[in-house]
Amino acid sequence: MTDAGVQWQVEALEGLLGEVRLQASRGVGPDVRKVLEWLRRQTGVHAAMVIGDAGTVEASTADFPREVLEPLAPLLVRMSVGQLAAAVTQSGALHVRCEALGPHEPRPVLVVAGPSKPTPDAIALISHTGSVLTLLRQAGRSDRIWHDYQHGTHQLRFAVLSALLSGEPILARRMTTGAIPPLLDADQLRLYLLRCPSADRDRIVRTYQDPSGYHGSGLMVQCPVFEGHLICLFTDDEEPGAPGGKSRGHAEILHRLVRDNPRYTMGVSGGHPLHATAEAYNQAAHALAAARTAPGRVASYHGRTSLEAVLPRQAAQEWARTLLRPLDTATKTSTDITRLTMSMPRSAVAKLLGVSRNTVTAHLKRVEASLGLDLTDVRCRAAIHLALVLTSSRPAPEPDYDQTLSTLDDLLSTERAAAWAAATLRPLQTRHHQTLQAWIDANTDAQRAARALGISRNTIRTHLRSAESVLGLDLLTAGTGIHDIVHALHITNTRAF
């Protein structure tokens, strides 16, 4: 080969490598047509990538003479199944070269056609192009496999989380047969709820993911409902309680990420057994609401007495079972959807379950008809939520047929309930107390509350955010703290009269 020929090949290959680098940097899979067009500009030949024994053209240069492919069909079949690696033939007035690419059948075939036999330099460049296309296709296949793997592991982690949130750790183990995460063998877990930019949470999940698709002894799961929320379950040996009171493992990593990123906040639950993961999530959500103004933007849930714990046990159980008895004839799906809408918006429930908002509404309409209650009313939702908590957190007592059935007002009129309400609302400033009252009276409609108080809607939301922080209750994201506020305000208002 002459020096000029060598120089031409070097320059041509540099151009080919430039195209490869450009495509690789985009990370969207190979653009075969662009490579073939580049080959045509360098050599003057038309080119096509033919796939399978059916002779399907995956990509080609503009004006590629497809009529040459029909008489080549038997040859292309032999090359596709690995019987031939390369062939040269004549199709009418065109000189045709075929080269099978890759090691696996069915092998794609690079077909080039021109009016004359290409020069040795052009033949070498055609062969180099075939090798590059093989590598690009393999890289694209690897990318697809990687994305499929990431999607699969995300789905598995979410399924495990869903089972734990439903209080079914045994079901979670059955989902992971063969690769059971260490978390499912733990006695207790804590739930970290990290708020960060959505792109960051995806990167965090990938960075700390192990080969099994988990995260060491824990799980990190992108919340399917609230963008920017990362749900992290860790065994208690990664949490505060180690010598010196320091977190370890991935828990320590999350603390460091929050410390180093001013836009991050995090709420941490207390320790819970696996079957109480839902309670851990609620605690972390409340702590996250307080984290915006907490030192280091991290807040841990500090145990407070729940309303159901201060109510007279048997009377509360009887009231709850009576209120919910119509649900005994409802479908499990309708009941489950009702439970979910007690702690998150309907649109969020639809997104979580992968159904339409209309489907969620239809199930709730059936439940409303059964209960005779309006589930769009915040006070009705608070009553139903309390009843659901009472019937799920404690075993049903033996019925007392001689006892007069209590109403909800009866249950909330005790001194213990009054003390609970006072403790719940004590951190509020007067203006925030007034805003909360107006907001509840307006059925959590900020615009209506703003009109009632003669202030702006933005001021209402600012007050609510401040109330969230001082109360340590989530009011505006999932809204899991609204029910406590409804009952606490009702108790204090009733006693005021």
Image: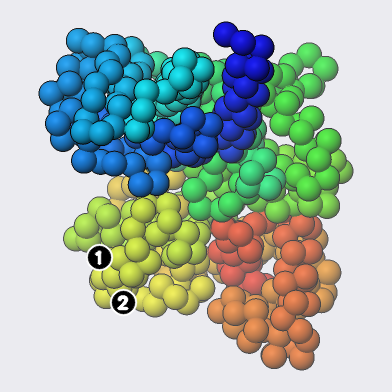
Q: Quadrant of residue 413?
A: bottom right
Nearest the camera: 142 or 476? 142
Side of 360 relative to 280 (left or right): left
What residue is at 63 percent from the left and 86 percent from the top? 448
- Position of residue 98 relative to residue 388, above or below, is above
Residue 216: percent from the left, percent from the top?
57, 18
Residue located farthest toward the right when viewing the structure as drawn: 295
Residue 139: percent from the left, percent from the top?
48, 24
- Position of residue 467 relative to residue 82, above or below, is below
Disc 1 on helix, strand or loop? helix
User: Looking at the image, can residue 59 be seen?
Assistant: yes
Which residue is denoted by mark 1 in the rendering?
326
Identify which amino acid the numbered label 1 is placed on.
Answer: Pro
Side of 482 relative to 91 (left or right): right
Nearest the camera: 279 or 289? 289
Which residue is denoted by mark 2 in the rendering?
372
Nearest the camera: 391 or 59? 59
Q: Quadrant of the C terminus?
A: bottom right
Whether the residues at callouts 2 and 1 have beta carbons within 8 Å, the answer is yes
Image disc number at residue 167: none
The 10 Å Cα crowd at callout 2, few under 14, some 14 to 19, many 20 or more, is few
